[in-house]
Image: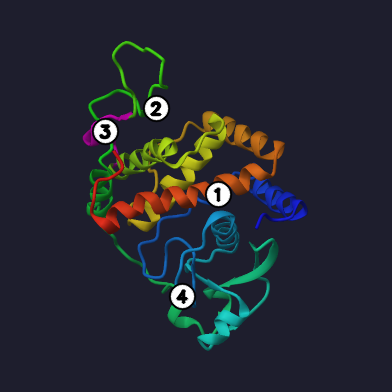
């Protein structure tokens, strides 16, 4: 069910306000501790998807929460917890449903993230396995990062067929995690023709950013460590805000498509097959 226009506008305004403050809800700090990662429901154990994943991440960023466990008051009562206000408004079947993070729940110590120092050496094996199993045509030793889409039928462009990714070699990245972050970003674009997604460049970039950041969190890859061109990044955020402000439906659509893209890519790890190429 599509959310009423009033709710779409309210949610859109909340995300636009965050972006204008320089907060990208999907770009969470890296945390390898248990009970971290994409938001999950405490009773169903399922991952929150679409706009709700973004809203819950923003709620956690603004309040300094680390746990990925969330639920309604009723959900938390089922596991012996008592949720405390204020919660986060999510959208379910066209209406608001208030959801609470484990840090807001009395009696939920088991679901919180320990406040202890840690040292972590990233393990990129799952990330590498996902990339290989997609069967995507990734051409390394290049001087740019880009997905070349398939050439439309009937259009002659030399002898190029398209549908491949160009990237530098892994050792060309100063930080190893940046290779995976960029690969996931480009794989998001690679998924677009496979999942029937076609929209403007700005929306496509938001989708790729949500996908890359979420996959990094799921697979234990630290986020982008390279330096930002802050002027360019600010211009990019401004472009995103302009597109989202133009039509509140864009945000709901892109968040829903990002969840489908993430699930599609993670399916290659689950089934161990290379069926996407």
User: Which circle's residue, 3 or 2, is located before the other in the chain?
Assistant: 3
Magenta highlight on residue 165: yes
What is the secondary structure assignment of the residue under circle 4?
loop
Residue sticking out furthest to the front: 154
Tell me: residue 7, above or below residue 96: above
Q: Between 240 and 187, which is closer to the camera in this rendering?
A: 187
- Magenta stretch? 164-175
Colour mapping = rainbow
Of mark 4 and mark 2, the one earlier in the sequence is 4
Q: Nearer the viewer, mark 4 or mark 1?
A: 1
Whole-angstrom CA distance, mark 3 to mark 1, is 26 Å
Secondary structure type for disc 1: helix
Q: Which mark is residue 112?
A: 4
- 3D distance between C-alphas at marks 4 and 2: 43 Å
Question: Alpha-carbon neighbours of circle 3 within 10 Å: few (<14), some, or many (≥20)?
Answer: some
Q: Looking at the image, is mark 4 or mark 3 earlier in the sequence?
A: 4
Per the image, the residue denoted by label 3 is 137
C-alpha separation, residue under disc 4 versus residue under disc 3: 41 Å
Determine which residue is flagged by label 2.
149
Residue 253 visible to an observer of this rendering: yes
Element under label 3? loop
The residue wearing badge 1 is 255
Residue at the extreme bottom: 80
Point out residue 229 in the picture as x, y percentages from the top left corner: 48, 31
Lower position in the chain sequence, tag 1 or tag 2: 2
Residue occupying image coordinates x 56% and y 31%: 200
Instruction: Characterize the local packing of mark 2: few (<14), some (14-19) or many (20 or more) Cα atoms within 10 angstroms.
Output: some
For the residue carrying disc 1, how many other residues have a C-alpha within 10 Å: few (<14), some (14-19), or many (20+)? many
């Amino acid at each position: 069910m599509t959310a009423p226009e009033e709710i779409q506008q309210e949610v859109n305004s909340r995300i636009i306000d965050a972006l204008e403050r320089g907060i990208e809800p999907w770009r969470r700090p890296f945390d390898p501790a248990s009970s971290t990662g994409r938001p999950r429901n405490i009773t169903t154990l399922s991952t929150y998807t679409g706009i709700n994943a973004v809203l819950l991440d923003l709620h956690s960023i603004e309040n300094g929460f680390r746990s990925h466990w969330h639920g309604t008051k009723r959900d938390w009562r089922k596991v012996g917890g008592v949720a405390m206000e204020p919660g986060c408004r999510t959208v379910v079947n066209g209406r608001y449903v208030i959801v609470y993070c484990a840090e807001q729940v009395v009696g939920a110590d088991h679901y919180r993230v320990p406040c202890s120092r840690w040292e972590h050496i990233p393990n990129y094996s799952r990330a590498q396995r996902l990339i290989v199993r997609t069967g995507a045509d990734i051409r390394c030793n290049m001087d740019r990062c880009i997905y070349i889409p398939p050439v439309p039928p009937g259009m002659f462009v030399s002898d190029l067929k398209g549908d491949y990714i160009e990237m530098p070699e892994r050792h060309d990245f100063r930080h190893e995690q940046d290779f995976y972050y960029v690969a996931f970003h480009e794989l998001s674009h690679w998924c677009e023709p496979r999942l029937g997604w076609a929209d403007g460049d700005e929306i496509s970039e938001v989708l790729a950013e949500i996908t890359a950041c979420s996959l990094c969190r799921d697979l234990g890859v630290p986020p982008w460590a390279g330096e930002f061109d802050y002027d360019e990044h600010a211009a990019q955020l401004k472009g995103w805000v302009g597109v989202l402000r133009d039509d509140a439906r864009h945000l709901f659509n892109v968040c829903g498509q990002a969840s489908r893209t993430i699930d599609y890519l993670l399916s290659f790890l689950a089934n161990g097959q290379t069926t996407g190429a």
